[in-house]
Amino acid sequence: MPLRTAFRWLGTTLIVSGALVLVWVVVVWQWQDPFTALYTKWEQHELRIEYAHRLAQYRAPRVVVHKRKRDLAAYELSIAAAAQRYRHSLHEGDPIGRIKVPRLGLNMIFVNGTDTDTLKKGPARDLHSYLPGEGKLIYIAGHRTTYLAPFGNIDQLQPGDLVTLEVPYGVFSYRITGHRIVDANDLSVLKSHGREVVALQACHPRFFATHRYIAYARPVSVKPWDGAAYRYTGTELAALGRHASLSH
């Protein structure tokens, strides 16, 4: 093959390769990495099966609730105790429950722990945080461009958007209140301040890990699996000294 022809083929190959790389970047930027998505889809399938077994075997404590105000406090305390027991029963990588965020088109099983392998399975709870109903910080991280990109459009969340966490002992509804962007090494965001808050976290900006985008949501209602739904208040829990009686 003449040298000129070889160079022509090399140039064509480089141009085609560059074009394919550009297409790939656009695909991942607009949607997500399809190859890692296949892995997470399989993991989610397995997690759904495992969680179904966990749900079938779970026995929530029953509490007799009358129509007096103080009984609501006792009910909230029973939910908090159930949440704590459930959290202590979990191991890293276990399915916790289901997270739904309509604005993001998100409906996935979220898992326990945020190590590299666990985060590939889906949205994941940081082990330094808590579970719905404990009245403390619930910190959930997720990928933004890979592994189904559960939080790919986290920056599109708006105040008032719904976040639902379904766990064996109840269904907890929250509303987005705002967001903040912090340095990737800022560990102060993992500190709980004695009130129930959901924090959804992803890398920021996309394709980089220099910062973290955190969207916050406050609780609005609770639907225990074995009882009537009620609006969340939290004031009765504080009055009863809940944090002192339910140490972690």
Image: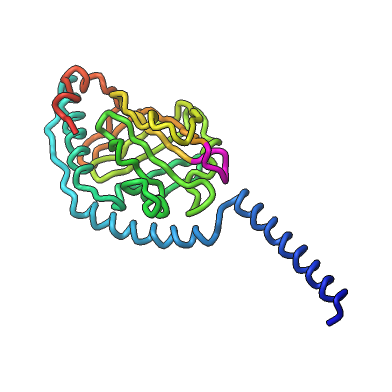
Q: Is residue 199 magenta?
A: no
Query: Measuring 51% from the left and 34% from the top, which residue is drawn there?
Result: 157
Judging depth in this view, the residue of 110 and 67 nearest the camera is 110
Q: How is the image coloured?
A: rainbow
Which residue is farthest front? 3
Indicate left or right for 55 with 19 as reference: left
In the image, residue 119 sits, relative to residue 73, either above or below, namely below
| Quadrant including the C terminus | top left
| Region rendered in magenta | 203-210
Give the quadrant of residue 52: bottom left
Judging depth in this view, the residue of 131 and 6 nearest the camera is 6
| Quadrant including the N terminus | bottom right
In the image, residue 230 sits, relative to residue 47, either above or below, namely above
Judging depth in this view, the residue of 129 and 217 nearest the camera is 129
- Please provide percent x and percent y for residue 112: 31, 47
- Please provide percent x and percent y for residue 47: 33, 57
Count of marks overlaid on the render: 0
- Please provide percent x and percent y for residue 134: 25, 32
